[in-house]
Amino acid sequence: MLRRPVDISMDNRRLGNPASKWAWTAGVVGVAGLGAGVLIGVLTDEGINRFLSAYLVNYMYFLSLGLGALFFVILQHLTRSGWSVVIRRLAETVARNMLLLALLCLPVLLGLGRLYSWADPETASTNHLLHWKRPYLNSTFFILRVIAYFAVWVWLARYFFNNSVLQDRTGDVGLTVRMQKVSAPAMVAYAITITFAGFDLLMSLDPYWYSTIFGVYFFSGGLVGFLGLLALMAFAVQRSGRLTHAITSEHFHDMGKLIFAFVVFWGYIAFSQYMLIWYADIPEETSWYLVRQSGDWAWVSLALLAGHFFVPFLVLISRYPKRRKNLLVLAAVWVLVMHWLDVYWLVMPAASSQRVPLHLLDFTCFVGIGGLYFAATVYRLRDCSLIPERDPRLSESLAFENV
Amino acid sequence: MIGYLFLTGVGVWGVNNPVGWGWAIVNFVFWVGIGHAGTLISAILFLFRQKWRTSINRFAEAMTIFAVVCALIFPGIHVGRVWVAYWMAPYPNQMQMWPNFRSPLLWDVFAVGTYGVVSAMFWFMGMVPDLSTLRDRATTRIRQIAYGILALGWRSSNRHWLRYERAYLLLAALAAPLVLSVHSVVSFDFAVSQVPGWHTTIFAPYFVAGAIFSGFAMVMTLIIPARQFFGLEEIITLRHLENMSKIILVTGMMVGYSYMIEFFIAWYGGNPYEAFAFVSRALGPYAWAYWIMISCNVLAPQLFWVKKCRTNVWILMIVCVLVNIGMWFERFVITVTSLSSDFLPSSWGYYSPTWVDALTLLGSFGLFSTLFLLFIRYLPIVAMAEVKSVMPQAQLDRGIHRGLGDYWGDMPHIHDEQPGEPSREQAVSPAHRTSERPADTKAESYSYLVDFETAGDLIAGAERVRDAGYTQWDAHAPFPVHGLNDAMGLSATRLPWLVFFAGLTGAGVGLGLQYFTNAVDYPLVISGKPFFSLPANIPITFELTILFAATAAFVGMLAFNRLPQHYHALFKSRRFRKATTNRFFISVEARDPCFDRVRTKALLESLGGSSVEEIGE
């Protein structure tokens, strides 16, 4: 499995000066997008509620990508992976956006009463079931929980990013050992927080509905999306003339395998949830799917089934497209789009149960949050190398070859 | 015990009216769960490139198969009228009925059946090279013949290794989702119902995690004594045990996670029946079983956070036995508590097993250990060929070029035998290949054979033979040598396409079968489901896809390699027997167009191996 490590001394391993320019541009675009969103929200008939829904879709989209990145980083340390070292810095940087996401959560928390029906005091006090759930589903506790989740995530993301960058300078192998030690409890904390975050931010949009697997579903979708993003980033970095030797078709092959595997995993989780609810046919559970199976939403559901599972499954099952960057990046963009649709499908029916309310706001919010997200990523990469320069497993990664 | 049961009927069991599912299902789920570790180690760890698995996978695969055998007993006897168990097969019985494919119990038949077949193929296929080693090192004639038959005429040919490795990878890729599906389907037995405590969406991954958890614990329980007893400490090292204990910890945490989420949602869902089911588990009449489950499954493995516990054989053993017990009780808790207190308090009842139940469980353990001891006695318990390929000597790139013989030791009996002694192949040799033999003189011999000490020499030699333009030649190595395919100039195999189309066929057959039987030929309304209900048909469609594809991978590999082929001219060579142990060979056949007695011999002699041997037809 090992060949001679690739020589990367000639590689450009830094983003360098253009990074600031890109970061500023993206930042301005992001602010403009969000500003336009608020403006449309205030000025149009649909109003601020529509803006909040669109914002939540895109916010959850980028949050799930960031959580996918965090999982990826923790997993690489937990399993002491060698192959992935050259692309780990990209993942660390995406995960590091957690602080930005914590700030961007403010509009969601401010709009709590408009987004979540349980947070509306009038509904909550008259509805028996919501009254029962009140110890858990109330605004104060909700906000405290969200703060707690972000405290965990921000700390973890910073820990793994900072130590990895520190190692670039010091070359201290002890840092790797320490990160491996932390990765195990980190995974436990991650599992619990992402599960309840999924329950809180997405599942409670329909406060009557419940599903024990929902946290896993949220996690699996985000991971598929992030793996697509990772392949896309690796591709983009190479297109800009950086890391042209370090990242080989072997690494793309492995990213392809991971996308494939987690597409299947997502399908498995989605099916497990759907099948059990469909078969048992208990009204309080089927209501959630009923909305998504009737009206325009039925088409979105079918599009997800085909586009989020069958298309990437059939495209990536063969070895050939996984080893061709240009094909793989197409698949990566495809799963990113599909993951967006998945989040849209999770959030929107709560606000509009019959129609699929595609709106300009969905786009401006995407540009807004996405722009800021991109800006933060690039900005952070300005000052550090694109790969963990002195990771003890770097040479293993550079020598990596699939059987 | 089973005989008594057959004569009397299931009345001898402790099952009663609310608790219609008792020990049989508990034992079934328990054994199927045990059966998961084998294929997990074989397939999933293989896909994750976890090379340490090679020391333990054979062991675990064998355990899988025996556990599945034990598991299949229980639904078999649980149907009550065992003599009509074949009604479960999709075949119209005398009442012109078809099985109801919308029932999760029938999915079980397909899932566990497929799993048994695919695991057996995977196990056997992994064992073929090792069986050939046993054949070539056999000390008695009977063993030689027995292992020879099982080894299918494997001759370590690199052309075979190429397809073998591809088929193994494909089987692994097929077995991985299969493993997940089997216990998911088992979980659906419970979860598609509306019984509180059974119907919860996380059941599928939760059962899978539990199965892996219990399976690994059982592997450990068996492997720790075995390695002490057989002195395998150098092959199954503490590192292997430590890695397995980490997996036990991870899956144990997943199981704990599921317990927690179930409890939370039981409250959050606001369904009083659901909430009651869980409170009653923890505080009700079966609280003792529940707390055994929690302490064995969630608390005991927490010791594995500490490295000292992961590397202490005694602690490992104790925790793993506790996990086995805990997982049995998990199934007991799930099955019995939910049934004993259902929606109507008037029909509640307490379940207690009878002596027949207990002895049947004991009997299944007996069967399991009998099969297992037979395996340990007669078959290779460590995947030798795979272990060889990950030993330091096989790592060409690290610059260690040493013969494997240094490590494995030579078998004296191979040298002791007289060269003139007739071998079994000569005794049975048919007039083979005579029709193909060209008439000219250069074909007096079948082939030339030369052997090398190390894999590195073999690759260097193979490159030169390739460059000389030969086509009818082969390299032989006791394990697949990395880089040899390029050195021989071999192209990829078409096996993946065959497997892909076989999979499609399987899916088509599965769906078509269910459509025809349940919607066309014998429409029957079951629990208000449509005649053709796609979600309910997915499990069987999936299982048949895997079954067809995996069979294609296995049979296709054999067919493309023209195996079994128990006679081959190369087997006449005494020296060649070491091709399955520690020597590397190149053979050039006389029917190669480039073949020339003098020049070919000179070429082979110049490769730096041993003297060239000529093998007659």
Image (cartoon, coloured by chain):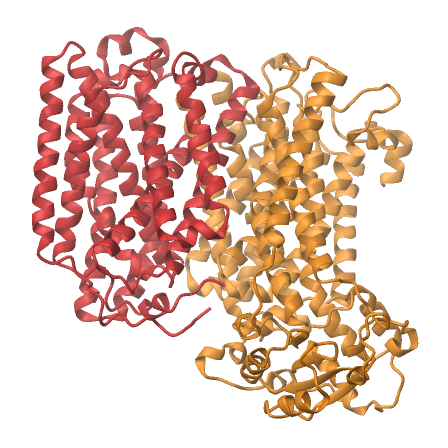
Chain colours: A red, B orange
The reply to whether residue B568 is visible in this rendering is: yes
What residue lies at 16% left-to-right and 68% top-to-bottom?
A: A169
Q: Quick check: A133 left or right of B173?
A: left
* Residue farthest along the top direction in this orientation: A126
Q: Quick check: B321 left or right of B356?
A: left
* Residue farthest along the front direction in this orientation: B440
What residue lies at 81% left-to-right and 20% top-to-bottom?
A: B97
- Residue A401 lies in quadrant: bottom left
Q: Position of residue B8 (x, y in %)?
A: 89, 30
Foreground residue among B490 and A102 = B490
Give the total of numbered labels. Answer: 0
Foreground residue among B213 and B605 = B605
Q: Note whether A365 is above or below B372 in the view shown.
A: above
What residue lies at 64% left-to-right and 19% top-to-bottom?
A: B532
- Residue B219 lies in quadrant: bottom right
Q: Note whether B605 is above or below A145 in the view shown.
A: below
What residue lies at 74% left-to-right and 71% top-to-bottom?
A: B132
Foreground residue among B83 and B594 = B594
The reply to whether residue B285 is visible in this rendering is: no
Foreground residue among B174 and B609 = B609
Q: Position of residue B614 (x, y in %)?
A: 76, 87
Q: Position of residue B151 (x, y in %)?
A: 77, 66
Q: Position of residue A292 (x, y in %)?
A: 41, 18
Q: Quick check: A56 left or right of B568?
A: left
